[in-house]
Image: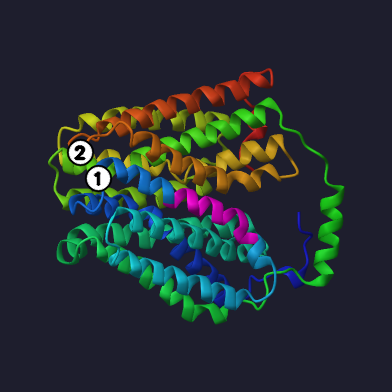
């Protein structure tokens, strides 16, 4: 861990923190509006139902790959110029998608956008970890960046897409990235820690206790990936499900927007109320609830029930993240394995829609939710295997989220 040092703290630099959060919001905006954007592409026959899952996989997997190197890019000098160039390129690629003629150019452009989004996210990660309480600041960021996603998810199907088609979604993404170009000068000149902090940090890292891939770590990481895969499979076909069941585009918009809003509510509830629940209990309950909702989605009797279940599904998306971190930090105190959570979850999110794409048809998307249910079931079994691998059934209350 980085030792505490006033020279390394950027809490007082509010414009820099706000700009870093904006960059991260622009990078992750696609995750909130992707179901609606891809559903509109299907409706316009720019892609097929099966290609929806494949296109989602391409971009999210590209984000995961980009995020794996993003932090190292911004730890060096010229943070401002790098952020401005990346944001500008991302805006240009999103505009280019409006003119993409054919499926291959669209796949290539969304893959390029994903890489740029992942690398740009590194700016947010580097700067927010330079605060006194990076866990809380990151929690604020995760909740805050979901709000514009919810607003866009509501505005797109109700107001924007009916007037301007799927290109409206690409324009929204381009505008967010374009604003980032003008905000980049508010960032620090460098993302590297000061010299007086870097040396002690390196010494601390060299003395950190070694860790190995225990069965418990493997099973928890596998469960995390499977659980996120199930979320990805369900979320990417949420809007398509509405169309196939005859629900209106307004219902799809309310469902997606409500889903994003309850993500924020769920995250705040964990921070303020439920943080004392043992991590294993919370995750087992959460994955069981997600399994039940995935099974329920294909048999929605009306649009109202569809919106309600969509909102309930969203309540678990961000809320379970702190418990996953808590479990991994407890069993691997150096916290190195915890740094892999973001890439692993993004990879999992990309796998789910890809697997589901092999089972959906142009008139039937229910199979995506049965796929999600299967992935949730496998995730639950992996959590149980993680518990059994350490020789006792459940963690003690003292192992709850600190």
| Residue, disc 1 | 48
Residue at figure coordinates x 64%, y 65% from the top left: 73
Residue 334: x, y in percent? 75, 44
| Residue, disc 2 | 362
Residue at figure coordinates x 51%, y 40% from the top left: 274
Which quadrant holds the N terminus?
Answer: bottom right
Region in magenta: 59-71
Residue 5, image quadrant: bottom right
User: Is residue 3 placed above or below 51 in the rendered structure?
Assistant: below
| Left or right, residue 356 beside residue 118 | left
Which of the numbered marks, if any, corresponds to residue 81?
Answer: none
| Left or right, residue 19 beside residue 365 | right
Q: Is residue 278 visible?
A: no
195 or 272, which lies in front?
Answer: 195
Residue 315: x, y in percent? 39, 43
| Left or right, residue 156 beside residue 118 | left
Residue 295: x, y in percent? 31, 27
Residue 74: x, y in percent? 64, 67
Residue 374, image quadrant: top left
Q: Is residue 323 visible?
A: yes
Which quadrant holds the C terminus?
Answer: top right
The reply to whether callout 2 and callout 1 are in contact (CB within 8 Å) is yes
Circle 2 SS class: loop
| Sooner in the amino-acid sequence: mark 2 or mark 1 | 1
Residue at figure coordinates x 85%, y 64% from the top left: 199
Residue at figure coordinates x 37%, y 44% from the top left: 54
Circle 1 SS class: loop
């Amino acid at each position: 861990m980085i030792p505490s040092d006033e020279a390394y703290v950027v809490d007082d630099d509010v414009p820099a923190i706000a700009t870093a959060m904006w960059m991260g919001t622009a990078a992750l905006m696609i995750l909130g509006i992707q179901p609606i954007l891809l559903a509109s592409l299907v409706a316009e026959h720019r892609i097929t139902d099966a290609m929806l899952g494949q296109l989602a996989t391409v971009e999210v997997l590209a984000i995961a790959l980009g995020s794996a190197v993003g932090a190292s890019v911004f730890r060096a000098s010229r943070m401002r110029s790098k952020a401005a160039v990346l944001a500008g390129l991302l805006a240009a690629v999103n505009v280019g998608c409006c003119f993409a003629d054919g499926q291959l150019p669209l796949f290539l452009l969304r893959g390029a956008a994903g890489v740029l989004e992942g690398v740009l996210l590194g700016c947010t990660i580097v700067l927010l970890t330079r605060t006194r309480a990076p866990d809380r600041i990151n929690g604020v960021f995760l909740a805050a960046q979901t709000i514009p996603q919810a607003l866009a998810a509501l505005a797109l199907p109700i107001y924007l897409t009916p007037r301007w088609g799927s290109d409206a979604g690409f324009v929204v993404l381009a505008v967010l990235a374009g604003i980032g170009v003008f905000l980049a000068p508010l960032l620090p000149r460098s993302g590297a820690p000061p010299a007086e902090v870097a040396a002690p940090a390196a010494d601390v890292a060299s003395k950190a206790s070694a860790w190995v891939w225990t069965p418990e770590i493997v099973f928890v990481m596998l469960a995390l990936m499977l659980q996120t895969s199930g979320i990805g499979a369900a979320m990417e076909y949420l809007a398509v499900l509405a169309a196939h069941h005859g629900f209106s585009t307004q219902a799809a918009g309310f469902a997606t927007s409500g889903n994003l809003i309850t993500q924020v509510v769920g995250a705040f509830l964990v921070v303020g109320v439920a943080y004392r629940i043992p991590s294993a209990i919370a995750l087992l309950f959460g994955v069981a609830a997600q399994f039940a909702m995935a099974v329920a989605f294909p048999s929605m009797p009306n649009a109202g029930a569809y919106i309600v279940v969509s909102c309930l599904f969203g309540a678990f998306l961000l809320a379970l993240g702190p418990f996953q971190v808590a479990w991994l930090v407890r069993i691997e105190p150096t916290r190195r394995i915890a740094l892999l959570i973001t890439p692993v979850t993004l990879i999992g999110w990309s796998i789910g829609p890809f697997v589901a794409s092999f089972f959906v048809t142009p008139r039937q998307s229910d199979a995506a939710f049965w796929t999600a249910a299967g992935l949730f079931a496998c995730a639950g079994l992996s959590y149980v295997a993680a518990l059994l691998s350490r020789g006792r059934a459940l963690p003690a209350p003292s192992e709850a989220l600190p």
